[in-house]
Amino acid sequence: MKPLSLFRVERRPIPSGQVVVLVSILAILAALVVAGAFFQAYGVSAIRAYQLIVKGALGSKLGLAETVRRAIPLLLCGVGLTIAFRALFWNIGAEGQLLLGAVAAAGVALFSGLPDVLLLPAMFIAGFFAGALWGLIPAALKARLGINDVITTLMMNYIAIYLVEWLIHGPWRGPTMRGFAYTDKFPSAATLPTISWTRIHWPTLLLGLALAVLAYLLITRTRAGFEIRVVGENPDAARFAGISGFKTTLLVMLISGGLAGLAGVGEVAGIHKMLLGPTHISMGYGYTAIIVAWLARRNPLAVIVTSLLFGIIMSGGDVIRVSLGLPFQVINLFNGLILFFLIGSELLMHYKISFSFGRR
């Protein structure tokens, strides 16, 4: 007789909001514990590392300003991703959509010849539609041909990266930059104002906060939001009710890609004031925003909090890299562990796995 091990998976009742918040907090704490073990293995005190993260990100005016500055693109991308995820469209392409928004904004700033008063509005409009178009391509491929959205959105990121590299090394390379792979600087009318002595481009911050509220109202108070929720929660019921999955998919990616494009506009117009290499425009904001949206449990308002949390991790991560001599990938360690425990907690919240042992 051989021992027999059986397991059974049962779906749990939908968890309450309090349970979801508690589980999310526990997932973050678990990630911090495991990350602390890695710090100890590297010969660094975990308590010392976390103290430096908090102090570096929140312990001074400069650190707090840098935290908020990092949270701005995470907020815009994260809000857009919550809407895409609501419709079960797994948009992994916010990074590329952000870069396309930056490219469109740079094109308007450098080559449009518009009057000064129209430059910034035109840059934001162009950035929104460039990011939206970049998102609509994989949306149409999935809706019409059934092509996997994870693969297409991810591959579009690499196309965007090489497009930016080609532009700054080729036709848009600034003749005044003396051989460097940048464009010329934007005219002053094409740059965003910042809060004194900081790099917080406040118009983009206010825009992100307003869009988080509008996205929440869209999801919870409109017919389009109802259709998005139905498509995401029960695609079969959506088809039976006559809700067009094609139109819904295009709508969510129009919004999601467009908001990521706005984040790209903010980075080039508020921080760099030129178009430069992809790794300088975005420090992985589009990828980190996936965790921001997931931790927010697809709630646009909660993204305000989770984007600030990851702003702390990103700015504090820079501090411990310099102070403790840790490798650059330390931020990726945090992000990966948090995402790992969040996915695990999602499984445990919605499913109960039981085991039984016997003999046959």
Image (spheres, rainbow, N blue to C red):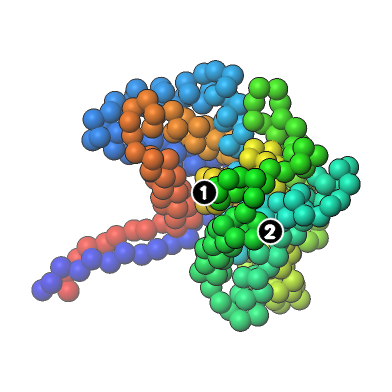
Q: What amino acid type should be assigned to the residue bearing mark 1?
A: Thr
At 60% from the left and 60% from the top, the residue drawn is 170
Residue named by callout 2: 131
Looking at marks 2 and 1 on the same chain, the residue that comes earlier in the sequence is marked by: 2
Say whether residue 247 is left or right of residue 168.
right
At 41% from the left and 48% from the top, the residue drawn is 336
At 61% from the left and 81% from the top, the residue drawn is 145
Which quadrant is the C terminus positioned in? bottom left
Q: Residue furthest top?
A: 60
Secondary structure under badge 1?
helix
Q: What amino acid type should be assigned to the residue bearing mark 2?
A: Gly
Which quadrant is the N terminus positioned in? bottom left
Residue named by callout 1: 279
- Vertical comparison of 40 with 244: above or below: above
Say whether residue 295 is left or right of residue 200.
left
At 49% from the left and 42% from the top, the residue drawn is 24
Q: Residue furthest bottom?
A: 145
The image quadrant that residue 128 belongs to is bottom right
Residue 352 lies, in percent from the top left, at 41, 56
Residues packed near mark 2 inside 10 Å, few (<14), some (14 to 19) or many (20 plus): many
Residue 149 lies, in percent from the top left, at 56, 69
